[in-house]
Amino acid sequence: TAVGTWKYMAPERFSNDEVTYRADIYALACVLYECLTGAPPYRADSATTLVTAHLMDPIPQVSAQRAGIPKAFDTVIARGMAKKPEDRYASAGDFARAAHDALSDPDQDHAENILRRSRESTLPGTAVTPPPSGPSSGPLPSAPQYSPPPAYGDPIGSGPLQRQAPPSQPSWGPASGPIPSSSPPPQPPQAPQYFQSGSWGGTPPGGQPPAGPAAWTQGGQPPGGKRNPWPIVAAAAAVVVVLIVAGIGIWYATKPGDNHNADDTTTASSSTTTTTTRSSPTTTPGGSPQSKLLSMLPSGYPSGTCTPTTPKPNSVWTNTIAMLDCGQNTNQGGPSRAIYGLFPNLATLKSAFNDDIAAVQLTNCPGEGPSPDGWHYDRDPTVTAGMIACGTYKNHPNVIWSNEGKLMLSDAFGDPATLEDLHNWWAKYG
């Protein structure tokens, strides 16, 4: 069951993949985007369109939405909203620091002043006391409590898509199904960091960050004249990020689990080396097969690029339970066309892989051994994650691979991408 507000929800919340604290970093990046532009990053008239946007649409550039926003925020938002959890910031504190660093020096001063004033101000009707000259031993306000939104069902229910391959040999256009790359376990959450006037990363006395700003008065504001409102807007947005991070950071620090640390880079393993095969489920996990397959696609497919289909009789895709036919991938070296398929069990996946590569003129994958070959994640060099084969089909560069953990088959074609381009793309995104 997915939990959260749709316009801030990370892609992995719409699938059966593990959801870690990095889903909240994605949500935090969406909040920062909305603070800077006045609108959420993705807007849609229907839940299905909105979910598809989170899963597949390019990350919007905040500087293009409002004049005067530093381009450095584009990088901050892009990393915070990365489709794959492992590509996001390792902690909410890192994200907040990056947002602060994206401000110009004058804007950083504004952010510090706003935060300082919020600490020194009091609620209406109470006496104003000057800030202490030294560290205070008194208790700090309690941090905001995290309360997850109500649960809801998966809105995606689109039908399957297939790209058909001929019985004896695949037709031009991918004749194999998709393979999603598995999301690596997240880095262990780091101790929450908070912004302090003039410094980052410290822990406030008492071990908790400030709860948030009280009412702020405009005393001390310089007189008259027109002023550019952007510095104040940017500074306020940065402070919002800092204060939200403070609350989320405490929850991360006390949340059980999420202690995994892994690198999800893929590497082909020598077929002559004995490896241990990762155990795979015999059936596909619950949920709509089509939505699951959609959520597992490599990044770089804008909305509408992939179309559900069904396999033709006697094709290599006959046993799929979901299938997608995708056009040009926008990542560097991405395929001009690819087929992705989800299978019900490991036996049908292996059979489809063998049938698919039978019609391909096989060659060595760039920098690797003969095709087909086993491949593994760098974090588990002795565990075979699936098989990969490189070659040409009707003079088109072709890379076919299986992911046994996700029961997926992928068939990607080049032109203009070369075989080396495709293989490099697979290693990074597949």
Image: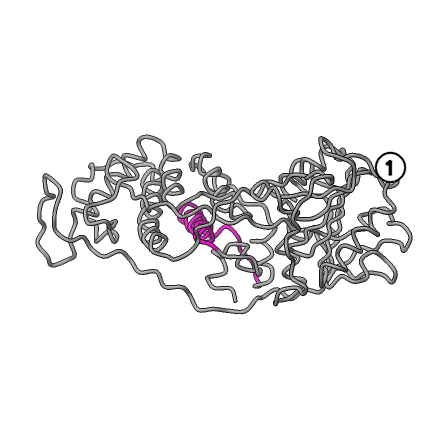
How many discs appear?
Answer: 1
The residue beneath circle 1 is 395
Residue situated in front as seen by the camera: 296 or 5: 296
**Percent position of residue 267, x then y:** 65, 39
Which segment is the magenta one? 20-45
Mark 1 Cα-neighbour bin, 10 Å: few <14, some 14–19, many ≥20: few
Judged by its main secondary structure, the magenta piece is helix
Q: For residue 32: magenta?
A: yes
Is 243 left, or right, of 150 in this rendering? left
Mark 1: secondary structure: loop
Figure check: 369 above or below 17: above
**Percent position of residue 32, x then y:** 41, 47
Measuring 67% from the left and 35% from the top, which residue is drawn there?
Answer: 424
Is 124 left, or right, of 98 in this rendering? left
Measuring 81% from the left and 50% from the top, which residue is drawn there?
Answer: 354
**Percent position of residue 146, x then y:** 34, 60
Residue situated in front as seen by the camera: 325 or 392: 392
- Residue 290 image-quadrant placement: bottom right
**Percent position of residue 100, x then y:** 35, 38
Residue situated in front as seen by the camera: 393 or 173: 393
Q: Residue furthest right?
A: 168
Inspect the image, locate mark 1, and give the three-letter code of the amino acid beneath it.
Asn
Is 390 left, or right, of 146 in this rendering? right
Figure check: 174 above or below 3: above
Measuring 46% from the left and 62% from the top, which residue is drawn there?
Answer: 4
